[in-house]
Amino acid sequence: MRPIKIGAHLPSFSLPNQDGVIVSIDDIKRDRNLVIYFYPKDETIVCTREACAFRDDYSKFEAYNCVIVGISVDSPASHKSFIKNHNLPFTLLSDEENEVRNLIGVPRDLLGLISGRYTYVINENGIIVHIINDHFSASKHINESLKALAHEQAINH
């Protein structure tokens, strides 16, 4: 498993969403910026804090023509409940077999015991422009993603 790097093109993949419908990341993204965040588990303290922080700043991401997608090993039913419980305005994808996590090379954290908390910022051309890794700080993922999107907008306009 070789981790994907900044400058690489996001590979295509499909996973079930919170409704159990198989969706392609390419269809979700289209010609927009994309933030994909991998997190360990629905309804845990830091994961809930992170999802709610993305929710609370959702309009800021929309202003950058950006769509947000969360991915964990939880089932579509778990994701559906998580979205409902916290009024999340974005898609959650279920990677129960860690296929996409392995495809992208998302590392595990804490001595390999816990799925890593990584966020990937992808520009309109499908290129990874920033990667955030912080297992304990949910806000760092949101703040750094927004800074990376602002930087992309500045260099492309």
Image: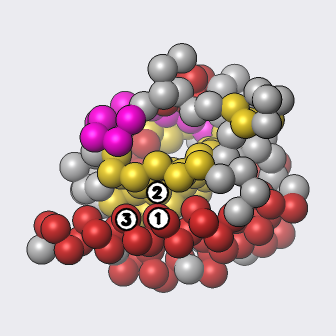
- The answer to whether one can see residue 60 in this image is yes
How far apart marks 3 and 1 lie (CA) works out to 5 Å
Q: Identify the residue under disc 3.
A: 148
Residue 70 located left or right of residue 28: right
Q: Residues within 10 Å of mark 1 (few under 14, many from 20)?
A: many
Q: Amino acid at mark 2?
A: Val
Q: Residues within 10 Å of mark 2 (few under 14, many from 20)?
A: many
Q: Position of residue 25 (x, y in %)?
A: 43, 42
Distance from disc 3 to disc 2, alpha carbons, whole Å, reads 10 Å
Nearer the observer, disc 2 or disc 1? Answer: 1
Give the label, 3 or 2, closer to the camera: 3
Q: Are marks 2 and 1 in contact (CB under 8 Å)?
A: yes
Report if the CB atoms under discs 3 and 1 are less than 8 Å apart.
Answer: yes
Q: Main secondary structure of the magenta part?
A: loop
Residue type at the position of mark 1: Ser
- Residue at horizontal 49%, vertical 66%? 144
State yes or no: residue 25 in magenta.
no
User: Tag 3's secondary structure?
Assistant: helix
Whether residue 83 appears in this view of the structure is no
3D distance between C-alphas at marks 2 and 1: 7 Å
Residue stretch rendered in magenta on the structure: 5-16
Q: Where does label 1 land, which residue?
A: 145
Residue that extends furthest to the top in the rendered view of this protein: 1
Compared across the picture, whether 86 is left or right of 91 comes to right
Q: Residue at the location (57% across, 33% down)?
A: 106
If the image is split into quadrants, where does the N terminus sit? Answer: top right
**Residue at screen point 69% across, 23% down:** 97
Q: Is residue 133 above or below residue 112?
A: below
Q: Position of residue 141 (x, y in %)?
A: 58, 62
At x 48%, y 20%, the residue is 2
